[in-house]
Image (spheres, coloured by chain):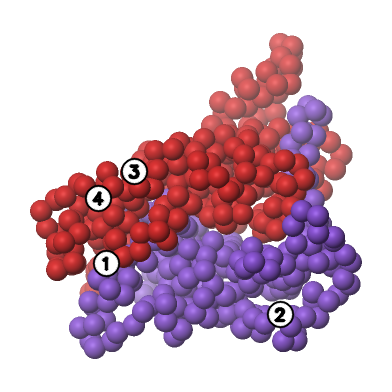
């Protein structure tokens, strides 16, 4: 037992915990990964340079991250809730709908990104024809004012199915006799949704909101595929990647420092949010 | 039944929205893949006479055969390992065989929130000689699936009655024999879910292959098809065929395991 357990924990420590600690240490160095280059302790300069013009892009990436996280979290959960409400049933149409909304998750980030690049290609794409019919012409993923909203849209498109399934699980866990009692009291329609269904969904809301927040903070796979972080879509995760691997002046130390800030931001948002949502659950369920 | 009509209307609206947003883009790419480039140039929105030359072009141009095999190798082996390691961590936790079992659980649970810290992993892969080789790439992708495997399997094992442990113990079964013969068959659905999510993680990773691999013959199909996009700009029908081929394995797998995915996500929702 011990041998197996320790083997498992060793893998977790070596490739999960050690890199995280190494990341913090690297953020205080000028590590470049070039063979023969010296690695020096540079103190907090990787951090201070974020706020000066030495390492540009931090302000913009900070704002982009906040916009991305808020829009994705709200969008994904609202859409997931609406879909779940409509697709929870046993009918064949509902089952087909569930398969469809879950499909992008199976496709995976790369395929999803490339599908939408084809769809929004500015030359022959259907989106170009569609918008062109209204006299709107754009480079879409290659345009400053289009790229970010589209990236947010694709991120929501990819993950809405997951939120939907979690909400469906929550909806199915609600005892039908509560609805019957409500109907006796004449509570129907919107009132029923607002007063009964939504509060009773609290555990699913907690799970979905937290997963969306943490997921959208840390993800940059999709942005890498869609824009590579150009046209105003460089979030902090993307900035870290670009600083470390994107140019000839590889600066892994700075990238690591950006990741540390990103991780702290995630914690600062996610932990109070989790406490708030748990408090809400306790208040609702007594 | 006053609210009957708006409900029907909103039901249809959501249905149409799902078909438009989720089915059409996929169908459109499929249609594109079967179009000849010349027909696509003149009328990109309508299907022409089916042309399969895009598929052979993409297959050869992007070296998709090797890359698909690489993808299958990486995702299956890495995910199988992380599921197995998840099992041997989860069992002692679920059975409270050690003193710090709940602390250990929290420790593993936190892993769900760790980002894939690609910068130190890149440095680590250089030091441990895991950079740019198949075995290294697999080893580096075991850990990301591990925390979820532990969480899922702990819950599953906890629902297996203790009496079975005692019965096996009476018969003198060893630890691993017991795990394999008694526990594994009873928690097969959870194992499958952990395995599928692990595979999905490997499949989703596009930064990993960019940073941790340099040799094109080692690329998984995701990076292969991504590079193919970069080197064949504006050959849209060819790119569409490449997407169709690259997504075929996951679509098959997804179709085969649809029911289990549905069920497990629902359990997750109930447990909160």
- Counting from the top left corner in percent of width and height, residue B75 is at 53, 40
- The residue that disc 3 covers is B60
- Residue at 84% over, 67% down: A28
- Counting from the top left corner in percent of width and height, residue A169 is at 48, 55
Residue contact between numbered discs 1 and 4, judged by CB atoms under 8 Å = no
Q: CA distance from mark 2 to mark 3?
A: 42 Å
- The residue that disc 4 covers is B54
- Residue at 40% over, 54% down: B228
Q: Nearer the viewer, residue A84 or A158?
A: A158
Q: CA distance from mark 2 to mark 4?
A: 44 Å
- Counting from the top left corner in percent of width and height, residue A134 is at 23, 87
Question: Numbered disc 2: what chain?
Answer: A
Location of residue A50 (image quadrant):
bottom right
Per the image, label 4 sits on a secondary structure element best described as helix
- The residue that disc 1 covers is B20
Ranked by sequence position, the earlier of labels 1 and 3 is 1
Q: Which mark's residue is nearer the viewer, 1 or 3?
A: 3
| Residue B244 seen | no
Q: Which chain is red?
A: B
- Residue at 54% over, 32% down: B188
- The residue that disc 2 covers is A55
Residue contact between numbered discs 2 and 3, judged by CB atoms under 8 Å = no
Question: Numbered disc 4: what chain?
Answer: B
Residue contact between numbered discs 1 and 3, judged by CB atoms under 8 Å = no
Count residues near mark 3 (Cα–Cα under 10 Å), then give few for <14, some for 14-19, many for 20+: few
Residue contact between numbered discs 2 and 4, judged by CB atoms under 8 Å = no
Ranked by sequence position, the earlier of labels 4 and 3 is 4
Q: Where B120 sits versus B77, above or below?
A: below
| Residue B63 seen | yes
Q: Which mark's residue is nearer the viewer, 2 or 3?
A: 3
């Amino acid at each position: 037992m011990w041998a197996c357990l320790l083997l498992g924990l060793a893998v977790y420590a070596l490739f999960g915990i050690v890199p995280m600690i190494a990341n913090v240490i690297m953020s205080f160095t000028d590590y470049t990964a070039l063979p023969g280059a010296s690695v020096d302790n540079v103190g907090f300069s990787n951090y201070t340079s974020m706020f000066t013009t030495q390492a540009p892009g931090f302000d913009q990436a900070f704002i982009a991250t906040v916009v991305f996280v808020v829009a994705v979290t709200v969008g994904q959960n609202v859409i997931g809730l609406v879909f779940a409400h409509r697709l929870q049933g046993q009918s064949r149409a509902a089952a087909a709908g569930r398969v469809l909304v879950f499909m992008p998750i199976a496709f995976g980030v790369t395929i999803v990104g490339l599908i939408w690049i084809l769809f929004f290609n500015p030359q022959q794409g259907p989106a170009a024809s569609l918008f062109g019919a209204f006299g709107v012409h754009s480079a879409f993923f290659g345009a400053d004012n289009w790229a970010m909203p589209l990236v947010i849209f694709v991120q929501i498109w990819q993950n809405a199915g997951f939120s939907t399934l979690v909400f469906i699980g929550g909806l199915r866990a609600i005892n039908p006799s509560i609805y019957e009692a409500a109907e006796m009291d004449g509570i129907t329609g919107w009132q029923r949704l607002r007063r009964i269904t939504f509060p009773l969904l609290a555990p699913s809301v907690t799970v979905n909101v937290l997963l969306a927040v943490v997921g959208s903070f840390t993800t940059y796979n999709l942005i890498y595929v869609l824009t590579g972080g150009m046209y105003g879509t460089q979030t902090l995760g993307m900035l870290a990647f670009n600083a470390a691997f994107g140019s000839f002046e590889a600066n892994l130390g700075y990238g690591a420092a950006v990741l540390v800030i990103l991780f702290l931001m995630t914690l600062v948002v996610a932990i109070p949010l989790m406490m708030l949502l748990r408090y809400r659950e306790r208040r609702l369920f007594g | 039944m006053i609210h009957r009509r708006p409900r029907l209307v909103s039901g249809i609206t959501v249905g149409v929205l799902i078909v438009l947003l989720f089915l059409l883009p996929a169908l459109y790419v499929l249609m594109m893949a079967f179009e000849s480039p010349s027909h696509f140039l003149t009328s990109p929105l309508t299907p022409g006479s089916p042309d399969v030359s895009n598929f052979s072009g993409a297959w050869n141009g992007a070296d998709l055969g090797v890359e698909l095999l690489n993808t299958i190798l990486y995702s299956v082996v890495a995910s199988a390992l992380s599921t197995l390691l998840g099992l041997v961590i989860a069992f002692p936790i679920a059975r409270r065989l050690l003193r710090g079992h709940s602390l250990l659980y929290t420790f593993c649970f936190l892993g769900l929130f760790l980002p894939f810290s690609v910068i130190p992993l890149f440095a680590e892969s250089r030091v441990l000689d895991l950079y740019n080789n198949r075995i290294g790439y697999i080893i580096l992708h075991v850990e990301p699936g591990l925390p979820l495997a532990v969480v899922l399997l702990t819950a599953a094992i906890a629902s297996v009655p203790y009496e079975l442990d005692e019965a096996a113990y009476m018969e003198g079964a060893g630890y691993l024999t017991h795990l394999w013969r008694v526990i594994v068959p009873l928690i097969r659905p959870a194992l499958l879910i952990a395995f599928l999510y692990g595979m999905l993680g490997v499949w989703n990773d596009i930064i990993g292959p960019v940073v941790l691999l340099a040799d094109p013959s080692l690329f998984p199909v995701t990076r292969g098809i991504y590079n193919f996009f970069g080197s064949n700009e504006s050959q849209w029908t060819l790119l569409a065929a490449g997407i169709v081929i690259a997504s075929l394995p996951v679509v098959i797998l997804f179709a085969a395991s649809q029911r289990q995915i549905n069920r497990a996500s629902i359990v997750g929702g109930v447990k909160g």
